Image (cartoon, helix red, strand yellow):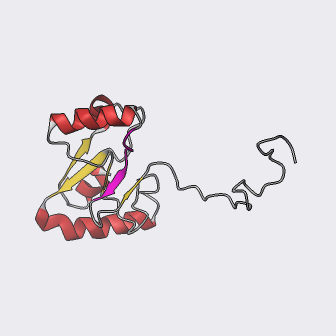
Amino acid sequence: MERRFREAGVEVRVDDESAIQHARFLAPKPMAHIKVEVAKPDMDRARKLLAEWESQGALRDAVHCPECRSARVQYPQFTRNFLLPNVLAAVLWKLRLAPAEFYCEECQFTWPPEPFKEAPELDALYWPKDSSKSGPIGPR
């Protein structure tokens, strides 16, 4: 990606935050960890290039916001500038007391890294309607 920008005459700085995510957030699999910085005068041109490259499939593996489709996503969702919130959040995530979520910098939408699962249809006793599964007393 960096090479493509430079070939198009746009100066960029690419930061890979995978090591930071792994160390600070105890994340086993870094997500949304590549950051591309562009100078303000080149911003419109860079966005047009990205849109063109995305239509060619260059960003197919990038995390996109499910609301606005922006690739300006942070994970996990909170500041990276201060140590104490990072430590506290990492402890809460490991204890599963607070979820680690993606954060869209464009529309401020947050969502979990796992895809949303549709709730099963329930019967009158609030058991899944799938008759192949057994109930509380055994098979039906």
Name the image quarter holding residue 20: top left
Residue at left offset 14%, top offset 39%: 82
- Does residue 74 belong to the magenta stretch? no
Q: Is 47 placed above or below 134 here?
A: below
Instruction: Give residue 114's position: percent from left, percent from top.
Output: 50, 49
Specify start and end residues of the magenta stretch as a single range: 97-104
Locate residue 99 relative to residue 107 in the image: left or right.
right
Residue shown at 29% from the left, 63% from the top: 108
Q: Count of labels shown?
A: 0
Q: Between 55 and 118, which is closer to the camera in this rendering?
A: 118
Q: Classify residue 4 by image quadrant.
A: bottom left
Q: Quadrant of residue 42?
A: bottom left
As for residue 101 lying within the magenta part, the answer is: yes
Residue 14, above or below 44: above
**Which residue is farthest right?**
140
Report x, y in % for residue 68.
38, 69
Q: Is residue 39 left or right of residue 32?
A: left
Q: Which of the pair 32/122 is nearer the observer?
A: 122
**Residue at x-position 20% and y-position 60%:** 9
Q: Is residue 93 left or right of residue 133?
A: left
Main SS, magenta region, reads loop
Please state the horizontal and vertical placement of residue 85, each as a whole percent of the image: 20, 39
Residue 92 against residue 128 in the figure, above or below: above
Estimate the x, y position of residue 43 in percent, counting from the top left. 19, 66
